[in-house]
Image (cartoon, helix red, strand yellow):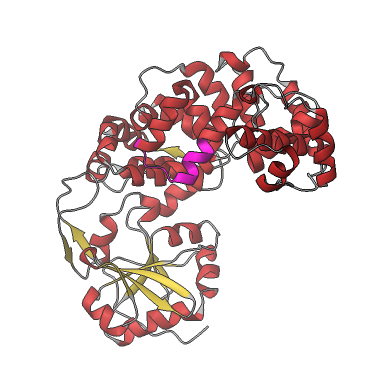
Amino acid sequence: MTQLILGNESDVKGTPLTDKMTKFVDDLPTELIEVLNKIALNGGGAWIVGGAVRDASMGYMPTDIDLATDLTPDKLLSIFPDAIETGVSFGTITIKSGGFLYQTTTLRTDGDYLDSRRPVDVKWNSSLFEDLKRRDFTINSMAIDVARREYYDPHNGVNDIKNKIIRSVGNAHKRIDEDALRILRAYRFLGQIEGNDWQLESKLSTAMIDNSFKIGELSKERIWQELNKILAFNNSGEILIKMMNDGILKIIFQWQQIEYVNLSSALSDSNELDYISKFVLLNQQLGLEGITQLCKSLKLSKNDTKSIILTYTNSLIIPQKSESYLRLYRFIIGDRWRQVLMLSKVICKYGLNKNVHEINVDFFDQIISLIVDLPKNKIQSQLIDGNWLMKTTNIGQGQKLGRLKEWLYRIQIENDLSEISDINRYLVKIQWHNSDFESWPRMSLQ
């Protein structure tokens, strides 16, 4: 390790690093040591803070490392001129060092919170104690002085990690009242930290429920950012049940009526579902129009919205067991076909939708096995184009030509055709000369 230079000392009583923290510090990249040394040489102190210390204390190597320093943003920018001005008004810049980025925030105290999200003003100071006191949970209010090989834990975060407790720093109601996003962050930590036996401290849990209405004051983007992470956890079923019972999901999704018992059972059986499928599972009772409006209300991306709508609509379709249909099924749904079938199975198993209520749940496992055994289609793109079809059939441009082209594409996928001669062979067989083109099969599962 590069020689370390002592920076300014903290006003918090230090404790020698634990064995797990020691391993973390010993493995820190040289690029970070250079940042810490540069701050020290310019008359400052710097400490690793937040989630990195939490993870290190549990024996994990953090993916992101944040710093706190007693130097002002202006001073930092003069030392690191290529730094990114991430949020200078709140004391945060991002320092570049080699291939690493380190978000660095000046020690501060926060003014009043008037929007349940951010303080009206902040004041720089040199007190690590005051800075740690403003943080959300005890497990996130620790710091490490790398050069002195000490950690600072004025709110007993290490003890709460040992006991697997999510606890607020100081008064729980005050912490949640300051920033309602902490409600969702608390639920996220239940799933983010390894193990399923973490608990919310009782006062924190009460404060979260009492202040849950303030979630409505948060930006939709921030709500979805946190909720998306929760939905993605393998163990999120139990977390979502708690959020539902605590009244949080009703606020986020603006539910009017919900059947809690069956949905709770389904969530307990949802660990194989991804975040898109879990979103649909939670809201499938809203119907297509309701889900579409919810995606718009939460300001989801076009890709997420498209995946959610595709997953919802296809989860209500009961597939046929024929090879030709399953080729079409896999082609139309794409990479999400397995998720759609697993979601259909859960919806069916717990009677959440009358359209798939009476199907034997083993049916969905059989369909999955059949699709797995199907070879991939030799050619996915359509073999013919409109010009070929016009020359072959003498049909002019228009709806009829488009519908025949679509019908032939369906035939290609269903039968795994790979030659234009195969298309020509089917074209001779199908009844397209004298029938109503609006009745022709479409590239659709219904």
The span picked out in magenta is 297-308
Task: Please tell me which residue is depicted at 23% across the width and 80% down the height of the picture.
Answer: 75
Q: What residue appears at the point 30 percent right and 48 percent down from the top-left corner?
A: 169
The number of numbered discs placed on residues in the rendered structure image is 0
**Which residue corresponds to the image point at 21% horizontal and 71% vertical from the top-left?**
126
Q: Residue at x 50, y 64 (%)?
A: 18
Q: Is residue 123 above or below residue 202?
A: below
Residue 51 figure quarter:
bottom left
Q: Main secondary structure of the magenta part?
A: helix
User: Against 58, is 87 above or below?
Assistant: below
User: How far from the left and from the top, in percent, is residue 292?
Assistant: 43, 32
Residue 130 vertical placement versus 69 (above, below): above
Picture coordinates of residue 410 (x, y %)?
71, 35
Q: Does residue 334 show up?
A: yes
Rendering coords of residue 243 (x, y %): 42, 31
Q: Can I make out residue 166 in this image? A: no
In magenta segment, residue 305: yes
Residue 353 horizontal/vertical position (percent)? 55, 17
From the viewer's perspective, is residue 310 above or below residue 79? Answer: above
Please give left or right for residue 47 compared with residue 395 in the image: left
Q: Closer to the camera, 73 or 50?
A: 73
- Most foreground residue, 372 or 52: 372
